[in-house]
Image: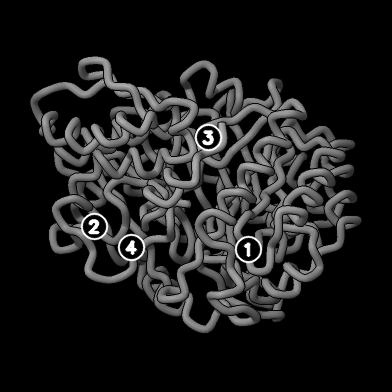
Amino acid sequence: MNAPLEIIRKYNVPGPRYTSYPTVPYWDEARFDIEAWTRALTRSFEESNQEGISLYIHLPFCESMCTFCACHKRITRNHAVESTYIRAVLAEWKMYCAILGENPRIRELHLGGGTPTFFSAKHLEDLINGIFCHGKRTEDAEFSFEGHPNNTTREHLETLYNLGFRRVSFGVQDYSSKVQKAINRIQPLCNVARVTLWARELGYDSISHDIVFGLPFQEVWDVEDTIEKTIAMRPDRLAFYSYAHVPWIKGNGQRGFGDADVPQGELKRRLYERGRDMLLQNGYREVGMDHFGLRTDSLYQAFRNSAMHRNFMGYSASHTQLMIGLGVSAIGDSWYAFGQNAKNLEDYYQLVEWGQLPVSKGHLLTPEDLAVRKHILDLMCRFSTVVQTGVLPLDVILKNLQGMADDGLVEIDSNKITVTEKGKPFVRNICMAFDLRLIDGTPQGPLFSMTV
């Protein structure tokens, strides 16, 4: 259901994407320290050891700057950095294993970046083998990585497949030459088709393409062309992301275009709605926010079975209470606390060399935080939640939601909140009605991208 213009205008406001709650700008760093972080880790590990843990490994290096990207990265063409970085990550992992007192059972492992395929296949093999010198995989383990179509080789795919990886995500963004030039991501269709074919031939269970709408100079026909080409390759799932235009964070990184070149408001919404319509007409099903999957894909099946989860790695078909983030800028999640590593590579190396966890900041969740977090996860993953009286001010939340109910975005049945079909594109806005930290502390300056 395409949104009326008046609804788009009304709800096009800055808002979080809610990969966590509280969102990073609202972390209470004054209450956080390494001792509290390790206590939260061990508590969560003891409570959930049987289900296994998740590992996110951040591989930050890229050979060139893609100007749409908001990830933490280091631009270099010097591949001698690979082995040094892997040694540091494995040293950090050994520290966590010592804290937990045993070799953890790993249920999820994801390589993100940066560009994981900046690293050679041999170095990635050394990394994964090093992780499993101090870890065991569960029987239902799911390993995934992000591949750049321009530099992912068949050797990368074969090596990681043999190590147990069964899901790969390729960054596509857009096939328009004008858009690619603006975002400094020149990537021919043939490169994407080649790596997609290789992954399918090798037996990967889930192949994903990442597409971005709202990029500079992007028009409706660019989205149509990109979606048509994508459908022809039939990836198992897609992430159809909104471009986050945040120049106050990225500084001069968004060169090659200006604010006026970026689709806003109504035009940006049309880009999404056209792409969404095409995907739905060709057998894909909407899964949570910004994601689509074929009926056979594990993420769609998890969504249908109310088993989907969301964390700093994005949407996941399985859930673990404890996620450890390794590498520069990586964020860990013990459910009771968040901890983020140093964002500067040299600081990260120094702390690891000193034998210290390289965590530079974090947040300890209060009982109220935990209650709000559960509701936001339910809304993001299941499009419904039930609000109980007690920890949260139910009257305040229902008052915040009433205008959205009047506009047909949610249905309120006593204390059960359900997102309607009309409301699904505005799920970020609906989550904001529960975000008590945002409500109590409205930011004075820009923090978040626009919700539309």
Horizontal arrangement in the rendering, residue 344 relative to residue 81 (left or right):
left
Cβ–Cβ below 8 Å for labels 3 and 4?
no
> Residue 309, position in %: x, y?
45, 32
Displayed quadrant of residue 161: top right
Pointer 1 or 4: first along the chain? 1
Q: Classify 406 as above or below 3.
A: above
User: Does the rendering let one see residue 72?
Assistant: yes
SS class, disc 4: strand
Of helix, strand and loop, which one carries label 2? Answer: loop
Q: Is residue 61 above or below residue 198?
A: below
Q: Position of residue 338 (x, y in %)?
A: 30, 50
Q: Which residue is mark 1?
A: 215
Q: Nearer the viewer, mark 2 or mark 4?
A: 2
What residue is at 54 percent from the left and 37 percent from the top?
A: 108
Q: Position of residue 260 (x, y in %)?
A: 56, 75
N-terminal-most mark, 2 or 4: 2
> Alpha carbon of mark 2 to alpha carbon of mark 4: how far?
14 Å
The residue labelled by disc 4 is: 359
Q: Going from the N terminus, do you reach mark 2 or mark 1 first?
A: 2
Q: Residue at x 87, y 39 (%)?
A: 232
Of the image marks 3 and 4, the number of the one nearer the N terminus: 3
Q: Amino acid at mark 3?
A: Ser
Provide the residue designation for mark 3. 316
Q: Secondary structure at mark 1?
A: loop
Pointer 3 local density, CA inside 10 Å: few below 14, some 14–19, many at least 20: some
Q: Are marks 3 and 2 in contact (CB under 8 Å)?
A: no
Label placed on residue 27? 2
Camera-near label (2 vs 1) is: 1
Mark 1 vs mark 4: in front? 1
Q: Tell me the CA gap for discs 2 and 1.
A: 30 Å
Amino acid tagged 1: Leu
